[in-house]
Every structure is written in structure tokens, then in C-alpha cells.
Amino acid sequence: MPVTNKQRLTVLGATGSIGVSTLDVAARHPERFEVFALTAHTRVAELAAQCRVHRPRFAVVGDVAAAANLREELRAAGLATEVLAGEAALAEVAAHAEVDSVMAAIVGAAGLKPTLAAVRAGKRVLLANKEALVMAGPLFIAEVNRETLCVVRQTEQVVLPERGAMLGNFGATAIDAGEAWVTDGEYPWPLPTETKPHPKGADGSVLLGRIYWE
């Protein structure tokens, strides 16, 4: 692999306003940044236009049909960009060994898993999606390597159970020097359109996790 001082970027949510602004900065400083991967959910035409300008190694879209359309369009433009689809592909380009920094700009809960994949892989994460903090905050705690500032995967511990429901804003309260409480509420269930129990047990409960520090 050739030696380079450029920062290789994956932009999650490239067609949104944050993604567009990120690419504008990268284009103004080609000596500092190289676009490695771009992702979008449904805006295939806009993503194709970005690929023609920035020529990433990977492009990721939401589903297989959209990927087929994008692949055909990029092939016609003479680009070698590899087109992938789905949630697993988002995590793949976020955690890829050749990526240095990840702009996490996917709106809503969809951005949680690829952002977490990037953190676990030791990437520099530029977080433009507060939902990743709101949703992941109460779910686990972990030790961080002080030199790399990366999560130590083996130290992750679940604080609140994940029962298939979206969670609201969480609260953290220091009880004393050795104990803290984390609270959060599940979104109401059942929904007005549902009559069956939630398949994972969610019922709109308020959850409490007690953390004891050594």
C-alpha cells in the first residue's frame, strides 16, 4: 500500500447537508483528504454525481435494487467504484482498515451501528448525529484506551437491556463516588396500529441501570 499523509474519509450520509459540506472541504484541500467511501440511503442520482467528482473506492446505498442502478451508472461513467448495499456494508466501510476518519452524518437511529463500528475499529469519528449518543449512551459502558482513544471491545458491559424499542433521552446520576444510575424510557408499546405484544418484550417501561465503580 502506498505511503500517504492524506486522511482517508468515509462519509456516512454523503448526500445530506453535513455530508455535502464535508465533501466541499475535502475538495478544497486535496493535499490533505482522500474520499474513500460515500454512502446514501435512497438519493442514488446525487450519490452518483458525488462519485463522479470524488471517485471513492466504495459507494453504499440502502438496498440491492438501488445498488444495481448505481453500479450501472458508474460503470457507464468509467468509474471503478465498488457499489455495496445494506446495513452491513455501512459498517464495513466505516471500519475499513484503510480509513482514517469517519463523518457520521446519517440522520436518526440508522447511523448508530456504522458509527459504533467505526469507534470499535479505532477511527477518528466526526459525529454529526446526536442519536448515536442518545441511543448508545445507556446501552453499554466500556474502557477507552488512553493512547488510541478507542473503545476496548473486551471491556464492554451492557447497562440497560435492548428489547427492540427505540429509547428516549437518557439520564445519568452520580449517587456517590462508587455508584451511578442510568435511566431511560422505551417508546410506548403497543403502538396504536399494533395489537400483539412486542416480539422482544418491550412494553414502554422506564429502565434503570445501577453502575458500581471500582
Image (spheres, helix red, strand yellow):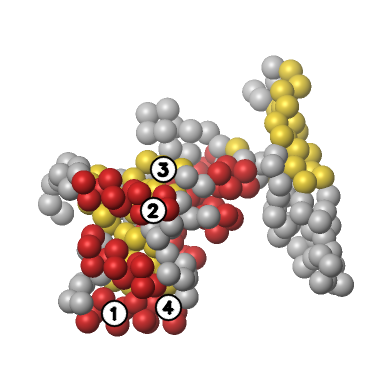
Dot 2 falls on a residue whose secondary structure is: helix
Which badge, 1 or 4, comes first in the chain's sequence? 4
Label 1 packing within 10 angstroms: few (<14), some (14-19), many (20+): some
Q: Is residue 141 above or below residue 58?
A: above
Residue 19 bears which disc, if any?
2
Q: Quadrant of residue 81?
A: bottom left
**Residue 76 visible in the snapshot:** yes
Q: Secondary structure at mark 3?
A: strand
At x 39%, y 53%, the residue is 19
Please report whichever mark, 3 or 1, sits nearer to the chain's N-terminal start.
Answer: 1
Type of the residue with mark 4:
Ala
Front-most of residues 77 and 64: 77
Q: Quadrant of the C terminus?
A: top right
**Which image quarter holds the N terminus?**
bottom left
Which mark lies nearer to you, 3 or 1?
1
Quarter location, residue 211:
top right
Say whether residue 1 is left or right of residue 90.
left
State the residue position of label 3: 125
Q: Are marks 3 and 2 in contact (CB under 8 Å)?
A: no
Callouts 4 and 2 close, C-beta under 8 Å: no
Q: Which residue is mark 1?
A: 73
CA gap between label 4 and label 2 equals 19 Å
